[in-house]
Amino acid sequence: MPLGTSNQTVTTGANFIPEIWSPLVIKATESKLVLWNRTWDWSEDNGDIVHTPNVSNLTANTKTAGSQVTLNAPTEGVTDLTATTHRECSFLIEDILKAQSKYPLSKYYTDKAGYAIAQVMDTAVSTNFANFSQTVGAAGSPIGDAQILDAIEYLDLADAPDEERCAVLHPSQKNAIFKIDKFVRADFSGNGPSKILTKGLIGDIYGVMFYVTTNLSTSAGSRLNAMFHKEAIMTGVSSGLRTQGDYILEYLANLVVVDVVYGTGESRDAFGVWMRS
């Protein structure tokens, strides 16, 4: 026997069904910040330009019996870092929103403001890679074993120390590296299971640590992947990263501002290689 048309449904009983707000929030994804902390830190507390004098190698001369020594008298240059880029990220939360919200909005957005500043600083480092006079690879072509070895050779010829070298790649090039058997197959590595396969990271290749991040700009149609020693890129913060808050009475709201004054530039050209892709 049919029920008829007078039965109650979710439509007729809509006012009895509560809408639930989850205690969770969905935060925007964040890129890996790997560049800034792998550069040469020239930070100073004050001033807008940091002058760093250069020291040349000396020449060993032949000593002839009965003659005076040949003196070295190099005229030294200076390398300058200009730290005048000022970035800020701020937000204002009114009292009524703070009172009625069940979420710690100030904490959420303070964290996001700090990340926004860190991301722009990280990306600024990658713009230096296009200035490296040494390059391997080509626009639109994946980075392979030959390009990695050529980049290492450039650094070796420049006498860049083995310590504190690294390579930074866009995720598309991580994909290319994974397709090279010798880097991922245990029978090639000879030392047990591949770290790439077991950990999902690129890790150490030929003694150079490889990192992946989306914070890589492009130049002349090429992605700015790079292999470099720490001293290839100078960075400095003349006004440290600050997080400041104040209550603004006329708005009945709390203002939070995160800001920094920084600079970055190329310090040792021969210590870096642009790995184009």
Image (spheres, rainbow, N blue to C red):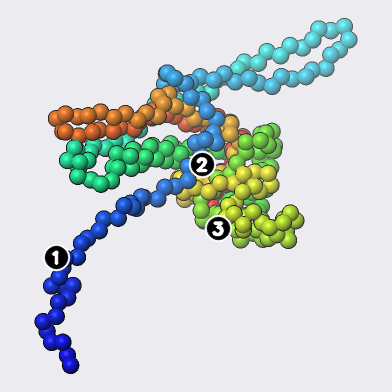
Identify the residue position indicated by label 1 in the image: 15
The residue closer to the viewer here, 213 or 219, is: 213
The residue closer to the viewer here, 42 or 202, is: 202
Mark drawn on residue 175: 3
- Which label lies toward us, 2 or 1? 1
Identify which amino acid the numbered label 2 is placed on: Val
Identify the residue position indicated by label 2 in the image: 34
Compared to residue 14, the image places residue 200 above or below, namely above
Q: Where is residue 162 in the image (x, y as percent from the top left)?
A: 68, 37
Q: Residues within 10 Å of mark 2 (few under 14, many from 20)?
A: some
Identify which amino acid the numbered label 3 is placed on: Asn
**Residue occupying the point 44% across, 41% down:** 123
* Residue lying farthest to the front in this orientation: 1
Q: Are marks 2 and 1 in contact (CB under 8 Å)?
A: no
**Residue occupying the point 58% across, 31% down:** 231
Q: Would you say 114 lies left or right of 134 here? A: left
Q: Distance between the residues labelled 2 and 3?
A: 18 Å
The total of numbered circles placed on residues is 3
User: Which element is circle 1 on?
Assistant: helix
Q: Position of residue 249 (x, y in %)?
A: 16, 29
Q: In which quarter of the image is the N terminus?
A: bottom left
Q: Where is residue 148 in the image (x, y as percent from the top left)?
A: 64, 49
